[in-house]
Image (tube, rainbow, N blue to C red):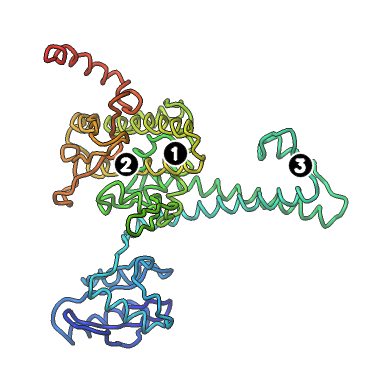
């Protein structure tokens, strides 16, 4: 189906057919017309029906209508649809035929369809994001206007503080038209900030009633993620079971490097920047906080105390490891954007791990802690290797038959264990090592 605001263009093909699909006409985009179409197709042939259409601005109404009727419907990711480079003709009928043929061959990629409550929270999060962008735009316009007329807030002081707003109130222009521009720009900033704070309050009030509130609460234990940022990430993740591993989640957010290799040459480029832009931006912003030494700040202390022990273990492991990696990359004179992107990519793996454990909590927290504490020395060359581990004891998802949950952040350096293993310096690990040392010396 090629879905539009008022109409839906339909093409039909059957399993085992070859060649193009058969055009089935155009119907109104209403629930009654979709029900009539499904009944007509059931009468025309035997077997089950499978519908598909591209994700777009019309939302998920068609999918929910067909699902309510008991039909199988796929919402297709537009960016993953195979297209012929030489095909220069495009219309609604051709799009519907192409979708039918590709769906028949199993060449389409489905997007995850949220329920109504999840979509409502996602809309509220996007509304707050739009308010934040409006404030940023209004401030930039005001600053640009003042800069054109050599009104500069000097002495290296920070802008948009109480002192800066007092300085703005003291500004005046001889020309009445310019004075109007100044006053309207200041008013636009004020109204935008009030709208942002108002939507922010609404969002904070709605988060505790959300079904993903435990995920939001546990993600807040990570450094650089507060309640609002955790809600944005939870809205992007949705159901963690749709990602088989942490690298899949990193690729979904567009944080993995692109590649254009051929033959013996391997060319690695910039990150793909695909997927959810808002979630990727939140991780990039959170990655900047790892340039400081690892510690639990005062405002984090209350949030950390409310999460389970297994989540605290992962959050502390993430903080110590990422802070150390940030400093090591800075010592190698890596560019700051490269460092921040690398930290954000690895932080996405910790986010995925916490989301998986929260969705399917472990039976015993001690089992989860033991699994997270394992380290694996590598036998490869000097670079650290990543070992896949199953979290079956820590709450592996039953819907993934035999698919292990991967913790790709547990590593060790054979020469300097304290440099790479975040758990080496904790009291629990020191007690464990001290108890095991006599036995190791006796065995040696």
N-terminal of the two: label 3 or label 1?
A: 3
- Look at discs 1 and 2 and give the one toward the viewer: 1
- Determine whether, in the image, residue 320 is placed left or right of residue 338: left
Q: Quadrant of the N terminus?
A: bottom left
- Residue at left offset 39%, top offset 37%: 220
N-terminal of the two: label 1 or label 2?
A: 2
Q: CA distance from mark 2 to mark 3?
A: 46 Å
Residue 265, quarter of picture: bottom left
Which SS class for mark 3? loop
Percent across and percent down for residue 143 are 71, 48
Q: Which residue is mark 1?
A: 226
Instruction: Tell me if residue 103 comes above or below residue 301 in the rendering.
Output: below
Closer to the camera in the image, 264 or 336: 264
Q: CA distance from mark 3 to mark 1?
A: 33 Å
Closer to the camera in the image, 412 or 145: 412
Percent across and percent down for residue 242 are 26, 54
The disc placed on residue 214 is 2
């Amino acid at each position: 189906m090629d879905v539009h605001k008022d109409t839906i263009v339909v093409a039909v093909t059957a399993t085992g057919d070859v060649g193009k699909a058969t055009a089935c006409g155009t119907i109104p985009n209403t629930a009654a017309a979709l029900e009539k179409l499904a009944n007509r197709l059931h009468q025309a042939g035997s077997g089950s029906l499978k519908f598909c259409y591209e994700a777009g601005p019309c939302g998920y109404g068609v999918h929910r209508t067909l699902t309510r009727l008991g039909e199988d419907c796929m919402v297709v990711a537009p960016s993953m649809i195979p297209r012929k480079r030489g095909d220069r003709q495009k219309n609604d009928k051709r799009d519907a035929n192409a979708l039918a043929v590709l769906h028949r061959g199993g060449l389409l990629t489905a997007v995850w369809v949220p329920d109504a409550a999840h979509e409502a929270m996602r809309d509220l999060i996007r509304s707050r994001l739009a308010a934040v962008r409006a404030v940023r735009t209004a401030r930039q316009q005001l600053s640009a206007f003042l800069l054109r007329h050599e009104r500069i807030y000097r002495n290296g002081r920070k802008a948009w503080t109480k002192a800066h707003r007092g300085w703005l109130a003291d500004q005046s222009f001889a020309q009445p038209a310019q004075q109007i521009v100044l006053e309207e720009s200041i008013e636009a900033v004020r109204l935008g900030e009030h709208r942002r704070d108002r939507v922010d309050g609404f969002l904070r009030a709605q988060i505790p009633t959300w079904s993903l509130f435990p995920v939001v609460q546990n993600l807040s234990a990570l450094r650089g993620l507060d309640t609002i940022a955790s809600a944005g990430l939870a809205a992007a993740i949705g159901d963690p079971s749709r990602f088989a591993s942490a690298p899949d989640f990193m690729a979904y957010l567009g944080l993995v490097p692109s590649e254009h290799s051929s033959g013996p040459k391997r060319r690695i480029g910039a990150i793909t920047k695909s997927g959810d832009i808002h979630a990727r931006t939140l991780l990039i912003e959170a990655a900047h906080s790892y340039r400081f030494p690892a510690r639990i700040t005062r405002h984090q202390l209350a949030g950390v105390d409310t999460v389970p022990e297994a989540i605290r273990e992962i959050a502390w492991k993430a903080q110590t490891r990422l802070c150390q990696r940030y400093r090591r990359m800075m010592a190698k004179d890596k560019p700051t954007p490269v460092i921040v992107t690398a930290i954000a990519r690895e932080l996405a793996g910790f986010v995925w791990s916490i989301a998986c454990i929260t969705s399917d909590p472990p039976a015993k927290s001690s089992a989860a802690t033991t699994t997270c504490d394992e380290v694996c020395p590598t036998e490869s060359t000097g670079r650290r290797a990543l070992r896949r581990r199953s979290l079956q004891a820590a709450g592996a998802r039953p819907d993934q038959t035999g698919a292990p949950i991967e913790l790709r952040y547990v590593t060790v350096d054979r020469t300097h264990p304290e440099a790479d293993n975040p758990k080496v310096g904790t009291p629990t690990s020191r007690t464990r090592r001290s108890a095991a040392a006599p036995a190791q010396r006796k065995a040696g």
